[in-house]
């Protein structure tokens, strides 16, 4: 018997309907292209480019924008996201620099603007 009593059964929750509703309300269509040269697909994603400032205790302020997009992994061409995949939002191209999976079928992709 585990410490603290018998093991408890963990309920699973299907977040699919929640993800669908959130993407329908807050998302926009974006073009997603895998880095390996696969076919591009239009998917829904919630895009943000938030401004951030960081005081590094020297008195200097570093200012930056960090574009990110939230996507449902199942909607992507290969069912997954990878570094160097490409996302086009409103005609602006970005490359994926980090994939942060949430364990529930969604991921936040940290992006960097592509230089033409």
Image (cartoon, rainbow, N blue to C red):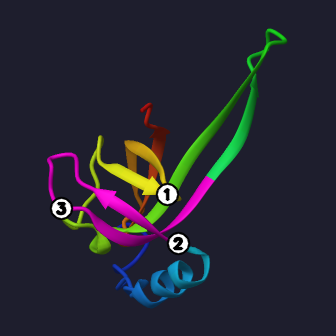
Label 1's element?
strand
Nearest to N terminus: mark 1 or mark 2: 2
Q: Please say if the residues under marks 1 and 2 sit with CB atoms less than 8 Å apart.
A: yes
Q: Which residue appears at 46% of the width and 85% of the height?
A: 20
Q: Quadrant of the C terminus?
A: top left
The furthest residue to the bottom: 17
Q: Which residue appears at 42% of the width and 54% of the height?
A: 88
Q: Relative to the observer, which residue lies in front, 46 or 15?
A: 46
Which residues are drawn in magenta? 29-48
Q: Residues within 10 Å of mark 1 (few under 14, many from 20)?
A: some
Q: Is residue 1 visible?
A: no
Establish if 42 lies above or below 88: below
- Which mark is drawn over residue 28? 2
For marks 3 and 1, give the CA distance.
Answer: 17 Å
- Residue of label 3: 39
Q: Relative to the observer, which residue lies in front, 58 or 89?
A: 89
């Amino acid at each position: 018997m585990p410490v603290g009593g018998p093991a408890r059964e963990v309920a699973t929750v299907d977040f699919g309907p929640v993800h669908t509703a959130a993407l329908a309300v807050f998302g926009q269509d974006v073009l997603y292209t895998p880095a390996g040269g696969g076919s591009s697909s239009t998917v829904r994603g919630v895009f943000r480019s938030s401004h951030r400032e960081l005081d590094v205790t020297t008195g200097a302020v570093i200012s930056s924008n960090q574009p990110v997009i939230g996507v449902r992994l199942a909607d992507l061409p290969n069912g997954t996201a990878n570094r160097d995949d490409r996302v086009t939002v409103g005609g602006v191209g970005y490359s994926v620099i980090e994939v942060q999976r949430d364990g529930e079928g969604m991921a936040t992709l940290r992006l960097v603007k592509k230089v033409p």
